[in-house]
Amino acid sequence: MTRRHIKSLYVFDIDDTLFRTTARAKLTNSEGKVKYLNSQELKDFKVKDDETICFAEFKDSKKFVDESQPINPIIKKAQDCIKEAAYGSKTILLTARSDLDCKDLFLEYLNSSGLDINHIYVERAGNLAKLKTAEAKKLIISKYLESHQYQAAYLFDDSMDNIQSFVQLKKVFPKIRIIPKHVDDTMINENKFLNQS
């Protein structure tokens, strides 16, 4: 008996899902007080009206290459998903970052970390600056699902905001299995999420 392959869309976040990163955002309030937030502090952070935020370190490819550390169990999972391309599935990396300052350097590092850049595409939710990250990610995933090529979609992400937003796609695409995978400290939490209906 041969295995029946389900065409799936696999979506992996980058920061604190595939890689531990050191980049920080600079938060400045109306009084000029500055605070720095790492990616863990940022993942579900809400900027107040009197604050401005600068993501310069998240655009720095050299910083990413020099300081980011692969999270090996999740890299391995991504590698397994990338192999499914032979059966019509697709793997994308979906980051909250906008365009990095040196695309080639960034992609070379992904490749050297075991992510075959010939079979993945990096989507940058940060380029949709007017949307919150969770909404931008949901919009990008929706565009892939609108092709009706996939029977299942998986999101591997450390942000519960992103996970909950992804789960909302069940209502939009009732025929596609929407499968959230919350990544927490190198482990994939496969528990059911409350707001899946």
Image: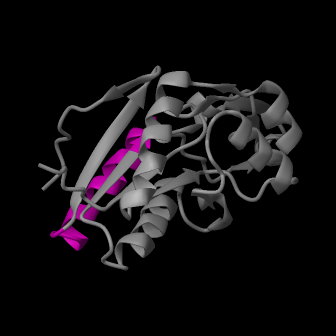
- Please determine whether, in this image, residue 73 is positioned above or below residue 49: above
Compared to 75, does 172 lie above or below? below
- Asked if the magenta segment contains residue 161, the reply would be yes
Residue 115 in the image: above or below residue 37: below
Q: Is residue 64 left or right of residue 73?
A: right
**x then y, percent, for residue 146:** 35, 78
In magenta stretch: residue 182 = no
Look at the image and give the residue range highlighted in magenta.
156-175
What residue appears at the point 60 percent right and 48 percent down from the top-left corner?
48
Q: Main secondary structure of the magenta part?
A: helix
Which residue is painted at 20% across and 32% down in the image? 191
Image side of residue 135 versus residue 29, left or right: left
Point 79% across, 45% down: residue: 108
The x, y position of residue 165, in whole percent, is: 35, 55
The x and y percentages for residue 186 are 46, 22
Q: Is residue 29 visible?
A: no
**Relative to the observer, which residue lies in front, 130 or 152?**
152
